[in-house]
Image (spheres, rainbow, N blue to C red):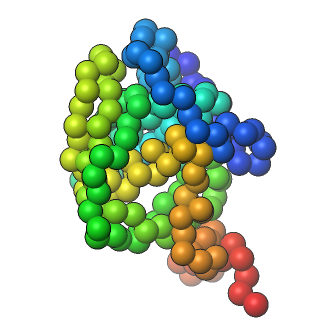
Amino acid sequence: MTLRTIVKVDDDNPVLRMRAQVVPAVSRRIRDLMDDMVATMRDAEGVGLAAPQVGLDLQVIVVEVPEDLEEPDGPSRLWTLANPRVISLSEAMEEGREACLSIPDLFGDVPRHVDIVVEALDRYGRTQRLELSGFEARVFQHEIDHLQGILYPDRVTGPDKLYYLEEDAEGNWVKVPLAAPD
Ligand code: NI
């Protein structure tokens, strides 16, 4: 396994804004890529990674979410998928905090569908149908967006929804807006 370099928005690499190519078949090369992406995601302490983020114009994502969000180091669920697409989604939406390994230090409050159904190929090329909700559904929507060249700041409802977090003198995390209000 090889750690891949994560493309950042400041690199001006167009791959982050491209529509990724469909994977014709889950070959050995694609499985190796999935394994490298899992290693890279874990090394960066992320919960998801899309192939464009390692410079490849391919519809491949990996997601790893703790079973219990209160215990980030406990057991987790891991998906390695090609050609994921959302085939149905709930009308209900929920705003929640997101970050992206390609956009260092920034956070955003992003509206996402609460429940989604995703169809994708697993690492053996089998079609899988996944019913996801809450945080898992959020991470999948974020990663599938990457395959369309969409980054989470595109999805926020206003500039005040994008912010940095800085620790104040009392040790509290304080939001510092990306765009200072006029
Ligand atoms: Ni991202």
Relative height, residue 161 to residue 27 (above, below)? below
- Image point 54% across, 75% down: which residue? 157
* 5 and 133: which is toward the camera: 133
Q: Position of residue 55 (x, y in %)?
A: 65, 30
Q: Quadrant of residue 63?
A: top left
Q: Position of residue 132 (x, y in %)?
A: 25, 50
Q: Position of residue 110 (x, y in %)?
A: 48, 67
* 110 and 163: which is toward the camera: 110
- Image point 26% across, 21% down: which residue? 126
**Left or right of residue 182: residue 130:** left
Considering the image in quadrants, where does the C terminus appear?
bottom right
**Left or right of residue 118: residue 148:** right
Q: Position of residue 80 (x, y in %)?
A: 36, 29
**Left or right of residue 173: residue 8:** right
**Residue 67 appears in the picture as rendered:** no
- Image point 29% across, 57% down: which residue? 89
Extreme-bottom residue of the structure: 182
Q: Quadrant of residue 73?
A: top left
* 57 and 73: which is toward the camera: 57
**Left or right of residue 40: residue 141:** left
